[in-house]
Image (cartoon, rainbow, N blue to C red):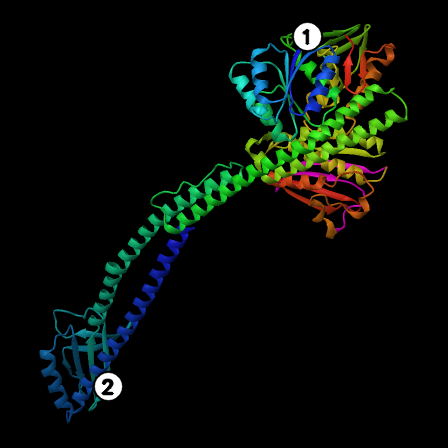
Amino acid sequence: MKLLVVEDDATTGTYIARGLREEGHAVDLVSDGKSGLIEATSGNYDVLVLDRMLPEVDGLTLLKTLRAAGNVTPTLLLTAMGDVEDRIEGLQAGADDYLAKPFVFGELSARVAALARRPQAQEAETVLRAQDLEMNLITRRVKRGGCEIDLLPREFALLEHLLRRKGRVQTRTMLLESVWDISFDPGTNVVETHISRLRAKVDKPFDSELIQTVRGAGYRVVA
Amino acid sequence: MPLRLAILLVALFAAVSLVSLVASYAFTQRSFEQSIRADLRQDLAGFRAAPNARAVALLVEAESREADPNRLILSYISPSGRIYGNGAIARDDEGFHIISLDPARSEFEGAYLSLTDTLHGGLITVARSRAEIRALGTVFLNILLLSLLPTVLIALGGGLVLARRSKRHVEVMSRALDRMTSGDLGARVQIGPRWSDDLREIGGKLNQMAGAQESATLALKQVSSDIAHDLKTPLQRVALYLDDLERHLPEEGETAELVQKSQTEVADMGQVFQALLQLARVEAGSPRERFAPVDLADMCYTMAEVFEPTATALGQSLTTRLEEVRPVEGDKALLGQMISNLIENALRHSPPGSDVILSLKEQEDGIRLTIADTGPGIPEDERDKVRKRLYRLDRSRNTPGNGLGLSLVDAIVTLHGATLTLQDNAPGLRAEVTFPR
């Protein structure tokens, strides 16, 4: 993928760019809003990683300008603030996702990957599959290797979310946001608990790992 | 309010005028009566000057011929029983009457004041009409109708118009204030050209205040974002260095553990920072702009689920007693944060084996959200202090938490126009949040 990182702090910018390159992306890095705007409009990027506070042209202004010009490149907004209001301002300005500092690299990388391949037109699917597992969204039944698996509503939602994003890492906060609809960190291990309950039902009886833990990042369903 | 004042003033004016009118009527009437009585006594004294009954009879006959019976009635019953004069005293079942001796009329109309006395063996009666006193009553009634009543009506009408106008102006101000308190920082009072001077002044002052509030909020935003930027940039670098370090280390081992601990600390620092920032924003009241209906029961259910693993790990249980309630106008994320902080606080301070109860129900006074624990509780004199920023009870210093939890709860509760009470759960703490109807 071709990515543009606009970040004014040189250290942070370099680390992000290096990490993303190590994952196989082509990354351009600029450190002020003006060059960011020029690059973003001229280059054909898959994802934009944009710091909210930038010299020259502020990140939010940059984003609004881009959107007003019809540029819809998926954008991840990085922000130092991170309160509810700041988040809403960011999303209203046209950001597709939002990440508060300090973040770990795994979180950023997972969110960038999620943005690049946002589920499109997959809504019509009625059966989700991964290996020998089958989830029917109409009858709400889950089968693996022909055996019926009983899931509680939240477990079903969690598995559905992972199946829809098969192969892609979902971080703890991403799951909290999508499956539990919580936009702040309650500091509990509800995600870990549900993942382990889900594994006990989905993986353990079949002796093969469908739900993987990705160190320092999150979870994913093996493609 | 101004309307009520106007009506009150007019009523007071009318009452005072009426009382003084009635009083002067009573006074004038009394002095009229007194002068009539004096006249009557004088009349009698005149007849007393006559030497005998015969002379009295002649005098009465003479004077009554000239007197108008509508004004003056004279009567003398001689010792022999003959009646002289233009009237006579008669008695029937109803009492004494003065009857006319003129065959054309039997009785006199109207009221009379009379004086009767014995004179030379006979009975003399002098009666004077009270018509003048009656006329006086009419005069006073006319004064009342023609002067007082119009005055009262004019005053009332004028008062109503003025009061309505000032009420409209006050409403303009009140609407602007409502918008200001609901977070619209740009709201101002539109002062009209016909406003009274005092309302104009108040409106102007309100606008000044709103302006100051707006610039203070903007300044706060600027300062917060500057501080956020300056503090978070190095914190972000540390987080990335630690990430990098982690990748260069084997997954297990003492060093890896140290790195993980450091990562947790960095994340916690970020959290404390976020909480402070959130608190400042909530206290400034700006999130009120985007209030929407929130399903509290659903949110309580989710939060209970989210904290269930924590409760289990602490050897506690988390029980919910949730009723469906009508939606509350609010900020979903902040209300979630509030419930989360209350549950977290309850779990953190309760011993293993205890049960934390989360309940929600519709009460007379509004929707009541209760979180009750069986921990050590909070002494009564410290219950207000725990709402303050970074305040922690001495004995809870050894438990984790940054002391921001309850102050953020308090700020969120205030933002939503709800009330937070901290009570003794005997033992433990019972936190109640009430959203008024």
Q: Mark 2 — residue?
A: B117
Judged left or right of residue B343, residue B101 is left
Residue A126's disc is 1
Q: Residue at x 28, y 60 (%)?
A: B148
Task: Indicate left or right for A124 with B317 as reference.
Answer: left
Q: Is residue B137 visible?
A: yes
Numbered range of the magenta stretch = B353-379
As displayed, is residue B147 above or below residue A56? below
Q: CA distance from mark 2 to mark 1?
A: 124 Å
On the image, which quarter does residue B13 sit in? bottom left
Q: From the viewer's perspective, tell me whether residue B190 is left or right of residue B45.
A: right
Label 1 Cα neighbours within 10 Å, binned few <14 / some 14-19 / many ≥20 = few
> What residue lies at 76% left-to-right and 11% top-to-bottom?
A142
List x then y, in percent, for residue A76.
64, 19
Q: Nearer the viewer, mark 2 or mark 1?
A: 1
Image quarter of the C terminus of chain B: top right
Q: Position of residue B373 (x, y in %)?
A: 78, 40
In the picture, measured across the screen, residue B110 lies left or right of residue A177, that is left
Name the residue at 21% across, 75% down: B98
Assign a secondary structure to mark 2.
strand
Q: Amino acid at mark 2?
A: Asp
**Label 1: chain letter:** A
Chain name for mark 2: B
Image vertical order of residue B132 relative to residue B426, above or below: below
